[in-house]
Amino acid sequence: MARTFQSILITGGAGFIGSHVIRTLLKNHPAAKITNLDLLTYAGNLENLRDVENEAHYQFVKGDIQDENLIESLFDKYRFDAVVHLAAESHVDRSITNPMAFLETNIIGTATLLNAAKKAWEGNMDDKCFYHISTDEVYGSLEEEGLFTEDTPYDPRSPYSSSKASSDHLVRAWHHTYGLPIVISNCSNNYGSFQFPEKLIPLMIRNIRDQLPLPVYGEGINVRDWLWVEDHATAIDVILHKGSFGRTYNIGGLNEWRNIDLIHAIIRLVDGALGRPEGTSKSLIEFVKDRAGHDMRYAIDATRIETELGWKPSVTFEKGLEATVDWYLNSGEWLDSVTSGQYQEYYKNMYGNRGKE
Ligand code: NAD
Ligand code: TYD
């Protein structure tokens, strides 16, 4: 039977996936009050939520998930009966250059939220839910064959994925030790609107638009399983309301692409949309030094969520990628605003002079 919630805390709601989750929950559960707690790091942007910011059942609080006093006071004030925890440092490349920020937010931040939920819900946990959003990267790296299932042993290999794996373990520990009603999902790579252009797809769209070099790590043969972000948001809604406590659900797109093939597909779409002759931007491709410890392949077996909860992806990659390209090309102001300032410095450190501007 589906649960209902009156007051939901979303962490990281100003980020890419969180902003879609907020939109989905407001639409599908209009009676629930949604509080978005976000520190507004470089990856968080209130522009991502412009269309819902005035909704009566939505409010934003700026703050850090590591701030125990703030979190406890929010639980006191708003009597949350559910937490959907998305706030995280989320970019593998940044985790390689600055791992400590990942341990702080992803591990200590998660533990702080778990403690606050436990304290607020002690003695009355039945109608509550702490939902932790995680990644398939906790399972490590696949070779050519096989898929990650919920029983695949954890084998994280980057500072990002090991910090997420740690947080998953903490969430399970709070369930087994203190009886906290939790669910966890581990999802594959998301794509769609409002993704910060440090990640592959928006970075490539922007660089093709601006005729900048397209940095392909290594040989471009690493494989990712891409999922439309709005399908992920729907899966999160379903798991929050129907998932079994203590259970993990893998979410994936059944949609594997080698990076280089995906980049060629994006080139075709962007050049086409901008009226350039086919293949114009192919010459921008530059094979650059590989990412340290680069995981070869991720791919998800999403049988459990389909058979137990009836969810499966609704959007084909063809349609989703075309819509994504259109969105970025028509959202020049958003793209330019998030790539001004700090982004320039990040880009220079990461890619050297390839981002000439
Ligand atoms: P994102 O980087 O776009 O957004 C993260 C948000 O968290 C930002 O709004 C940021 O301001 C906020 N934040 C960061 N540190 C914070 C702190 N200390 N306190 C409060 N807020 C803080 O990330 P995303 O891609 O939307 O990912 C959201 C979640 O989903 C993450 O937990 C990530 O691990 C997970 N995930 C992402 C993907 C993907 O493909 N993007 C896939 C699977 C799982
Ligand atoms: P990314 O979007 O960072 O997601 P993740 O590393 O979490 O899967 O990268 C997706 C893939 O694209 C990954 O194999 C690394 C590769 N990549 C590039 O080749 N060039 C780039 O500039 C970026 C950002 C990623």
Image (cartoon, rainbow, N blue to C red):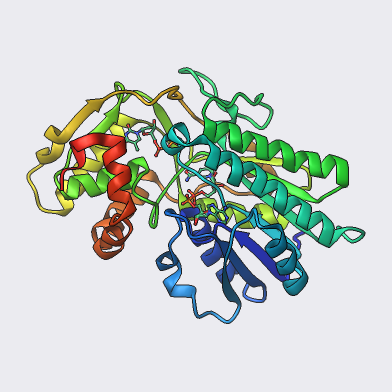
Q: Residue at x 74, y 74 (%)?
A: 77
- The correct choice, above or below, for 122 with respect to 321 in the image is below
Quadrant position of residue 151: top right
Task: Report how many numbered discs are placed on residues in the image.
Answer: 0
Rendered location of residue 232, percent (x, y): 53, 50
Asked whether residue 190 appears in the rendered view, the answer is: yes
Which quadrant of the figure has residue 7?
Answer: bottom right
In the image, what residue occupies the spot 26% across and 40% down?
348
State the residue in front, 170 or 154.
170
The answer to whether 239 is drawn above or below residue 149 in the figure is below
Q: Is residue 1 shown left or right of residue 179?
A: left
Residue furthest toward the left? 277
Which residue appears at 45% of the width and 68% of the height? 49
Q: Is residue 247 visible?
A: no
Residue situated in front as seen by the camera: 343 or 15: 343
Furthest residue in direction right, as rendered: 123
Q: Nearer the viewer, residue 87 or 295?
A: 87
Horizontal side of 259 relative to 88 (left or right) equals: left
- 273 vs 188, left or right, is left
Give percent across and percent down for residue 286: 20, 29
Q: Residue 334's image quarter?
A: bottom left
Task: Please say if 288 is above or below 131.
Answer: above
**Percent x, y of residue 183:** 72, 47
Name the spot of residue 200 as percent of width and height, x first: 34, 40
Q: Quadrant of ligand 2?
A: top left
Locate the N terminus by quadrant: bottom right
